[in-house]
Image (cartoon, rainbow, N blue to C red):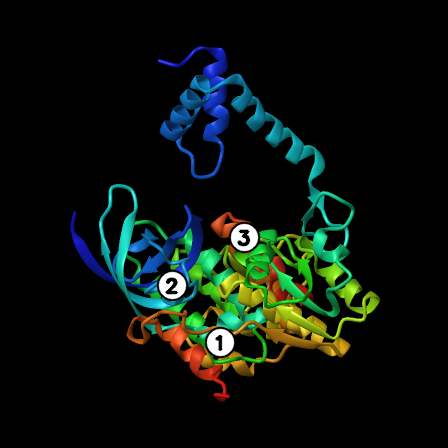
Amino acid sequence: MANYREQGIVLRTHKLGETDRILTLFTQGRGKVRAVAKGVRRPGSRFGGRLEPFSHVDLLLYEGRSLDVVTQAELLASHAEVRTDWARSAAAGVLAELVDHVGVEGDRDNHLFLLLRAGLQSLDAGPPDTGVFIDAFLLRVTAAVGFRVETTRCASCGLPGPHPFLSVVAGGTLCSDCAPSGTRAVASGVVERLDLLAGDAWSPLVALADDDTARVAASYARAFAEHHLDRRLKSYPLSERQAIA
Amino acid sequence: MLYEGAVQDLIDELGRLPGIGPKSAQRVAFHLLQVDADEANRLATAITTVKETVRFCARCFNISEAEECQVCRDTRRDPTVLCVVEEPRDLIAIERTREYRGRYHVLGGAISPIDGVGPDDLHVRELIARLDDEGVQEVILATNPNVEGEATASYLSRLVQPLGVAVTRLASGLPVGGDLDYADEVTLARSFTGRRAVD
């Protein structure tokens, strides 16, 4: 049984027995890890407060037969603001659910780890609108596992765009020849917005307007992620996005 | 090899209880086989009685054997202060302190987006109705100090504060008898923000 050290973000926790918890972590070096944290539900536990969902921690674990066991935990970022605010907590719930779904145990995925960390940092900074970060995260995680939304050319025939028709199943914009008849064209702002949402930068997202374009892009992002990842997101209906989507 | 009919049924049923695995279930089953019929009957009666007589209080959703629970029926209780807890167990924990003389409201859980549990799955609407009906002046949010509990407290305070009712949250901080250098950063930081003047 070997000890190992790993940085990770707590995705969710389950109660185990009287005072323990099972943590689902997304780690930088080993992908998803499920580990037992002993005694953390007791008041006065040595590391109870550090191992709450959305905490970014430096851990020492030892390999158990089925589950690993946390022996030490150092807090790197608590994302405390996310936890104490209902809207941000609900948004972070979507992030965690998504990473829990696409993450694979024992499979290193540094890109996904950095995405999750950046997403939580952005929410922690207190944006006025949390929904835009959910949209961006949905598209970026879907891209990370291989389905990037196509915005510059036709997703079907490859004709350089931009094109005004959108398809979830085809994976992006479609030209007028490829779009099924009766498809309604979307405003040009929607495609531009999707491009920005699926991009790499987080800071420009704060300035994005919350208008009709946002609504169309948000519902597209959700449909796109749910279709390609084959998962209905339980936490989505509880987030602020639901109010407008 | 499996045991015969009734014994195996008992083991299976016991194995469904929280914290009891197949081995413990087998041990308890054999214990029950050895004890007097009277003792086994007492256990059986206790289980059926609790399922028949215990229900949720119509007012606060605490467990109760009557229409309303003991706390709600007690006229000496202060009706203007309402303590909101997640589970009936939490209510008992607070009662043990003998510090609180107001009434309670049991939510029946906490908001947990990742598990798909939202405000509509809890007794939130009933809480809001009580505030007006009972002339409540202060709501104490006593949900657990974890992510779900904090999210619930944040949601409730956004809902209750505009109604002109004072909203307070239980303090977080150092455990009595604990060591400062073993406290985690989150707890220690909270105890700093929540510090108070010494009388």
Disc 1 on helix, strand or loop?
Answer: helix
Q: Position of residue A159 (x, y in %)?
A: 49, 62
Location of mark 1 (residue): A81
Location of mark 3 (residue): B115
Q: Classify residue A236 by image quadrant.
A: bottom right
Classify residue B13 as left or right of residue A201.
Answer: right
Classify residue A127 as left or right of residue B161.
Answer: left
Identity of the residue furthest to the right in this view: B133
Residue A138 visible in rendering: no
> At 50% across and 55% down in the image, what residue appears?
A156
Q: Position of residue B92 (x, y in %)?
A: 58, 55
Classify the position of the N terminus of chain B by image quarter.
top left
Seen in the picture, residue B69 relative to B198 is either above or below; the reply is above
Chain letter behind tag 3: B
Choose the circle earlier in sequence order: 1 or 2.
2
Q: How many marks?
A: 3
Badge 1 local density, few (<14 within 10 Å), some, or many (20+)?
Answer: some
Which amino acid is tagged 1?
Glu
> At 62% across and 75% down in the image, what residue appears?
B168
**Distance from Cα at disc 1 to Cα at disc 2:** 18 Å
* Foreground tag (3 vs 2): 2
Which amino acid is tagged 2?
Gly
**Distance from Cα at disc 3 to Cα at disc 2:** 21 Å
Which amino acid is tagged 3?
Asp
Q: Position of residue B146 (x, y in %)?
A: 48, 64
Q: Position of residue B127 (x, y in %)?
A: 73, 62
Chain letter behind tag 1: A
> At 73% across and 50% down in the image, what residue appears?
B57
Labels 3 and 2 share a subunit: no
Location of mark 2 (residue): A48
Seen in the picture, residue B192 relative to A44 is either above or below; the reply is below
